[in-house]
Structure formats: C-alpha cells, structure tokens
C-alpha cells in the first residue's frame, strides 16, 4: 500500500531541480500513506514520486517508480492486484519476463501486452500511473469500484496528479472555491465525484482511465460500469454461487507477507468476512470500537461474535473528549469534508487496529450489492401510490400544506415525488428550501438531484429498489464509504481491504433479482442464506444498526459550547447566514428537533475551511 504524486509537463523541463522540489513537496504531504520508503523518477517531461507501506516483502526489483522493458515504462501504483499470480503465469507463457515477485511488475507487463485495456484484466483495488518514455504518453486508471483514490489538476501546461487532494494544494497557484460543490455537499454530506471543493481539482471516477499525450488534452474514458442485470434463477443456485465466490474473494484478499486482521462490528457483513478469514488464518485478530452510551455501541455483540468464532478481539471505547480532540486531524485526513459521523469512529478503529496488524479486512460494499439499507424498503411501502397517479399532484400539494412534523406528511411527499427527484443516496441532509435559507449564493438552477441524474439515466430500465442500489454504488459508496475507509486507514498507515467489492463477487450479485435481495422484511435475504452455515446465529438475523455515534446527545451537552464556538469563529460569513445554524443548535439543545446530522455537516465544513482555505490551522499536532 502506498501513495504517489507527480507532474507531467507538456514543455521540456528546463529547471528539473525546481520541479523535483515540487514533487517532493507533494510527496511529503502524503507521507502517512507510505512511511516505509520513498522513490522518485525524472526525465525531461515528467517527475514521479512515490511513498510505500510494506505489505509484501519486496526486493529492490519491487521498488517504485518501477521500470519495465529496459525502462520504456515507468510505474507508480497504489493498491493490490489480487490475481497477480494467475496473470503472471499467463504472461510468462506469452514470453514476458519478471525480475521479482511483485504485483507491480505484473501490472506493467499486463499494460505492455494489453495497453489501455489492461485495467479490465485486474482483480483488485488500484490507482496507478504509467509513463511510456518511448511514446511519451501517460496512462492512469482507478479500480472498478473506487476503493483507491486519484486526484488531478491542470495548470500552465502541467498535469499534476496525486493519491490525495491535499498534495495538490501547495503546488497549484490557483485553487478557487467551488460554490456549486458546497451546495451539493450540504445535501450529500460529501462532494459527489468528479468534483471537489477546489474548482481546478478533479477526481478520476471509479472504473475510469485517463490518457494524456504531450501537448494534447487529457482523455478520460470508462472501462467498467457495474450494472445490475437480474436473471431469473433458482434460489438454491444463487445461494451456492454466492457462498463459493465469497470464500474465494476473502481468500484472495488475504494474500500478504504481514499479519492480516479484520474489523468486527456487531453486524452481519464484518462477521461474514471475519468468519471466512478464520478458515485461512486460525489466529486472525479482530478489532472493534464503540461508545459508553447504551444503544450506541455494538461492542458486546462484537465480543460475543469473536468468542463464537474463537478469535482474539481488541476493542476501544471512544469518549466525547477524545472524539473532539481527534476531530481536526480527522478532517485533515479526509481531503474534502466528509460529514458522516460514522467515519470518526472508523478513524479510531484504524488506529487501534494498526497497533497489531498492517492489513485489515472490512465488510464495506455488502449493503450496496445485496440491498442492506433500510431505505431500500421504501419502494415497497410506497406501492399504493402507483394506483393513485392521477391524484398524486394534488396529494403532493396537500402534503406541502401539512404542518411540519405532522404524521403522514413525509409519507405523502415521498409517495408523490418521483424517485429521481427524492432519492440522491443513503444520506440526505439539507433540502433545497433549507439550503436557500442559509446559503448566501444559493443557485436554484443547481438542485442536488442533478449530481445523480446521469446515474438514473443509466439505470432507467431497472426496478426502483435496484435503481436505489445503483445510485448508492455510484455516488454514496465511493463518495462517502470508500473515501472514509481509505483516508482513515491511511491516516494510521493501515491497509484496508474490501472482499465484497470484488469484480467476481459483483458478477454474482448483479444477477440476483430484487425480490431475493429484499424478501418481505428481510434485507440482504440471499446473502444471509448463503452464509447461514458460516456465521453465529445471534448475528444472522440481527437488524442493521450501522455505526451509530451519540452526537445527538453530545451536541446538547459535552459538545454544545465547542460547536457554538466553531460556528461563531468560522470565517465563512460570506457563504452562510450563521444565525440559521445557531438556531439549529438551540432547537437541538432544547429538544425541539434532532438537528445532529445537520450540525455535524456544518461543523465538518467549517473545520475543513479553516485548514484548507484560510489555512489558519492544521491537523492537531498530537495526532500526527
């Protein structure tokens, strides 16, 4: 696991020392991604930087930037190619030679053979850059689901790229604030890709590649689109296929020369991964975090699960005080603000885990692939509105006129609003009316649903439940969950692996009919059936709790003064009507409404703004 940075200049580099210093600056911003080693390459057009965290024992032949074919190709690569051993054998038959045993060299050989089609052959998580010194072309790609990040920007004939956005800020002369992205952030609790809060910086989207020839514009193209294609088949057949592919995926994700651990919550997804992992490493360690407040911790369930699986479990109880203390560095680690409260406990989980292992497995992705979120039941509950279509316009007006909080108002509004206008993902913070009330530059021509409109177009032939899953897999998954997973783990110099987000697993998941993903009141039905012989009974049919954080209570008590001071001190008056936010806080404290998620979205942004825009502060020194 590692990070990279670099700069490609259309014009010949006349001051190599200056550009070398620039890339060193970029590389130093992501030292946490690779504290074990660094490397650089420079020719007359490109400077490439690399940071490495040792996962597999490599000889000098595995050092990056890595050359291949007598130096024709140079590579920087962040991630893991899990099928590299199988690819290596195939490539050997075609005459390709290898000096070492790394997946990086296999990646290069695959590119030498297949060119820009190479990413289609990989099974893994990756972001990489290959510079062809002969053709003077740059090729980059990001993995199928967006597990690993890739940021880039262009300025004055130079193409900058990096594993994290923060590496680009110090070297760009211009990074103007993206007000449209701020408006989206206030609804999504993250900035939907490919945008960022810096107008000049973009994200290479999942399943996409980028090609750049000197003095030519960059070309971005999609090589993979995970589309659901339900197929009618016997339930027993699906169960068998899913059972087998999950075992295979966990097994291949455990390839490493260092100890591999597993996150373990009280839920089914992490339990599946840990249970299968135990088959291949009987001494696997598991890790959990929670809170002291009742109803906001699954530590007791996680420990019961660990006992049932006969695995060690290490846990940590998070207090409000250490939560606030770590918050500035958490925000710094995220690049753009991410206001998912569950991301902060994962920050602590990664730090706890890193004390014992270098690699950990997680259950991310199962909800999107198999229908795990409670919101996916909504199309079933709203079916009556399919029979009232001629009246739905009038019913919607009635819903709008009903007093806020009145029983039935939300049901009427949701049932009479098209899915494409009401559902933008698993999280929904502020609606358009609310944003218009506090954003001084609110743009009514930029509603939040525009950010996911392209996905709805792609999914127009799918049923409502599958459409929602498709939206979450293309927006929420990479915009929130995977960024959370990558940044919190990398901040602790921990490699995180996601066996559910595997192209072979998705091949099976894509064909499951929605009525087998959600059956009656049971979410992830077919997944539960596929693993019922693998996991303890107390977990199998347990309802999803998620990763709850007691900010609802903390913001009334321990965090109230802290929150109010952040709002008052924040130099963001040009963007916000702060009185609106202060009223949200007071209403929350008095119990008039639960504004905790809204307040957390505001706090996260204001802390980010202080660090990245005004640069008045940085990450907490004691957490570096």
Image (tube, grey):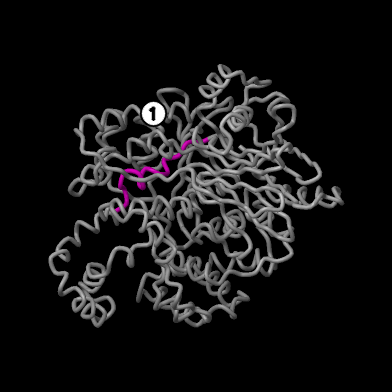
Q: Circle 1 — which element?
A: helix
Q: Nearer the viewer, residue 244 or 547?
A: 244
* Residue 524 location (% of width, % of height): 28, 43
Compared with 257, 7 (above or below) is below
Position of residue 316 in the picture relative to residue 570 (left or right): left
Quadrant of the rendered image containing residue 301: top left
Disc 1: CA contacts within 10 A as few (<14), some (14-19) or many (>=20):
many
Residue at 63 percent across and 63 percent down: it is 200
Residue at 30 percent across and 43 percent down: it is 229
Identify the residue position indicated by label 1 in the image. 276
Q: Is residue 326 visible in this depiction of the protein? A: no
Q: Nearer the viewer, residue 484 or 109?
A: 109
The quadrant in which the N terminus is found is top right
Q: Is residue 65 visible in this depiction of the protein? A: yes
- How many discs appear? 1
Compared with 291, 386 (above or below) is below
* Residue 170 location (% of width, % of height): 73, 59
Q: Which residues are magenta?
A: 360-374
Residue at 26 percent across and 79 percent down: it is 400
Quadrant of the rendered image containing residue 417: bottom left
Extreme residue in the left direction = 387
Position of residue 264 in the picture relative to residue 175 (left or right): left
Q: Is residue 615 magenta?
A: no
Q: Is residue 372 magenta?
A: yes
Compared with 111, 190 (above or below) is below
* Residue 27 location (% of width, % of height): 72, 47
């Amino acid at each position: 696991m590692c990070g990279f940075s670099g700069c490609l200049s259309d014009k010949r580099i006349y001051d190599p020392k200056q550009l070398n210093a620039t890339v060193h600056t970029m590389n130093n911003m992501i030292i946490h991604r690779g504290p074990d080693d660094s490397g650089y390459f420079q020719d007359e057009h490109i400077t490439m930087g690399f940071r490495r965290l040792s996962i597999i024992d490599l000889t000098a032949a595995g050092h990056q930037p890595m050359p291949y074919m007598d130096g024709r190709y140079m590579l920087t690569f962040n991630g893991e190619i899990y099928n590299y051993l199988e690819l290596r054998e195939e490539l050997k038959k075609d005459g390709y030679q290898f000096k070492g045993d790394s997946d990086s060299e296999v990646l290069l050989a695959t590119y030498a053979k297949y060119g820009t089609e190479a990413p289609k052959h990989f099974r893994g998580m990756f972001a990489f850059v290959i510079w062809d010194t002969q053709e003077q072309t740059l090729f980059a790609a990001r993995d199928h689901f967006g597990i690993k990040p890739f940021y880039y920007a262009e300025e004055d004939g130079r193409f900058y790229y990096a594993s994290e956005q923060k590496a680009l800020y110090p070297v760009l002369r211009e990074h103007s604030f993206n007000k449209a992205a701020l408006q989206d952030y206030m609804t999504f609790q993250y900035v939907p890709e490919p945008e960022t809060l810096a107008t000049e910086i973009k994200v290479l989207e999942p399943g996409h590649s980028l090609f750049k020839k000197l003095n030519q514009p960059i070309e971005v193209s999609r090589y993979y689109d995970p589309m659901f294609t339900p197929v009618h088949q016997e339930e027993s057949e699906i169960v068998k296929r899913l059972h087998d592919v999950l075992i295979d995926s966990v097994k291949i994700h455990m390839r490493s020369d260092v100890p591999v651990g597993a996150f373990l919550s009280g839920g089914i997804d992490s339990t599946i991964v840990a249970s299968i992992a135990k088959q291949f490493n009987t001494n696997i360690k598991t890790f959990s975090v929670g809170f002291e407040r009742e109803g906001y911790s699954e530590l007791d369930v996680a420990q019961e699960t660990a006992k049932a699986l006969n695995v060690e479990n290490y846990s940590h109880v998070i207090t409000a005080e250490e939560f606030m203390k770590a918050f500035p560095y958490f925000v710094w680690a995220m690049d753009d603000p991410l206001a998912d409260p569950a991301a902060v406990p994962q920050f602590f989980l990664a730090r706890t885990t890193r004390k014992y292992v270098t690699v950990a497995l997680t259950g991310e992705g199962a909800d999107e692939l198999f229908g795990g979120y409670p919101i996916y039941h909504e199309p079933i509950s709203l079916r009556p509105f399919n029979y009232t279509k001629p009246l739905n316009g009038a019913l919607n007006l009635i819903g709008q006129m009903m007093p806020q909080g009145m029983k039935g108002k939300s049901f009427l509004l949701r049932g009479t609003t098209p899915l494409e206008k009401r559902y933008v993902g698993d999280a929904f913070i502020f609606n358009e009316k609310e944003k218009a009330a506090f954003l001084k530059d609110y743009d009514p021509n930029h509603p939040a649903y525009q950010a996911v409109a392209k996905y709805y177009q792609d999914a127009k032939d799918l049923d409502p439940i599958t459409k929602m899953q498709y939206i979450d897999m293309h927006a929420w998954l990479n915009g929130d969950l995977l960024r959370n997973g990558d940044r919190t783990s990398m901040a602790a110099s921990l490699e995180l692996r996601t066996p559910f987000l595997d192209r072979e697993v998705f091949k099976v998941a894509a064909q499951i009919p929605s009525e087998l993903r959600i059956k009656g009141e049971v979410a992830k039905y077919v997944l539960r059936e596929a693993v019922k012989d693998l996991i303890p009974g107390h977990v199998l049919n347990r309802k999803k709790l998620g990763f709850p954080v007691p900010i609802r209570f903390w913001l009334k008590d321990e965090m109230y003064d802290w929150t109010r001071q952040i709002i008052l001190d924040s130099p963001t008056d040009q963007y916000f009507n702060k009185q609106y936010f202060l009223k949200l806080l007071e209403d929350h404290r008095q119990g008039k409404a639960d504004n905790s998620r809204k307040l957390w979205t505001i706090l996260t942004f204001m802390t980010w703004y202080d660090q990245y825009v005004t640069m008045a502060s940085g990450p907490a020194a004691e957490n570096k």
